Image: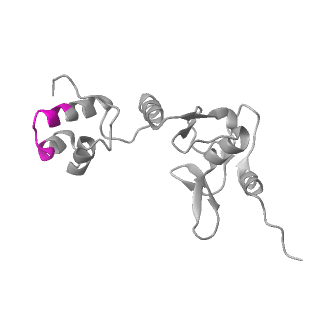
Amino acid sequence: MGRRKTTIAERFWRFVDKRGPDECWNWIGSTSGGYGRLVIGTKPITRIGAHRISYLMHYGVLQSALDVLHTCDNPSCVNPRHLKLGTPLENMIDMCKKGRSSAKLTPQDAALVKRMLLDGYSQKVIADKYGIGQSMVSWINRGHSWDWVAPAEAGY
């Protein structure tokens, strides 16, 4: 007789340091950028965020267009009481407000970059002014980065 396959839930709980109901339940398995990851399947291999699996297991609903946000600011936490759904914009705003962004630009800088682009400055000049790569200026220009920030009125 063959071995019984373990369920995703069984595999998930093997890697959770479950504490009190209001404490962080830290993921002790594989991580990427501090966030827990669980491998699902074999070919192709899919890595899913442990916090997303936790949210799905506890609330039964997960929309792919929404992020699962940590109210505790602990990326390894999988306690469902510390998780909520939010848009990527809400996630970015929360991250910036709490000073967790590794971005070189502030939202105010991004607004000024957009103003300079509208006023015809070259991407190279803007990149040099803010100490960022020309490719980042291009991403801002095309709306792939900082798309939620409006151009500044003036003042660069």
Tally the numbered discs: 0
Residue 60 visible somewhere in the drawing: yes
> Which quadrant would residue 137 be assigned to in this image?
top left
Label the magenta part by its dominant secondary structure: helix
Q: Where residue 108 sits: x, y (%)?
A: 28, 28
Rendered view: 71 above or below 131 = above
Rendered view: 156 above or below 67 = above
Q: Is residue 121 magenta?
A: yes
Screen quadrant of the N terminus: bottom right
User: Residue 122 versus residue 132: which sits nearer the camera?
Assistant: 122
Residue at x 68%, y 37% (from the top left corner): 80
Residue at x 31%, y 40% (from the top left corner): 104
Left or right: 13 with respect to 136? right
Q: Is residue 34 magenta?
A: no
Residue at x 60%, y 71% (from the top left corner): 43
User: Residue 40 versus residue 16: which sits nearer the camera?
Assistant: 40
Q: Where residue 97 sits: x, y (%)?
A: 43, 28
Q: Please provide the residue range marked out in magenta.
A: 115-125
> Which quadrant would residue 47 be assigned to in this image?
bottom right
> Which quadrant would residue 84 be assigned to in this image?
top right
Residue 132 visible somewhere in the drawing: no
Left or right: 50 with respect to 107? right
Screen quadrant of the C terminus: top left
Most distant residue in the right direction: 1
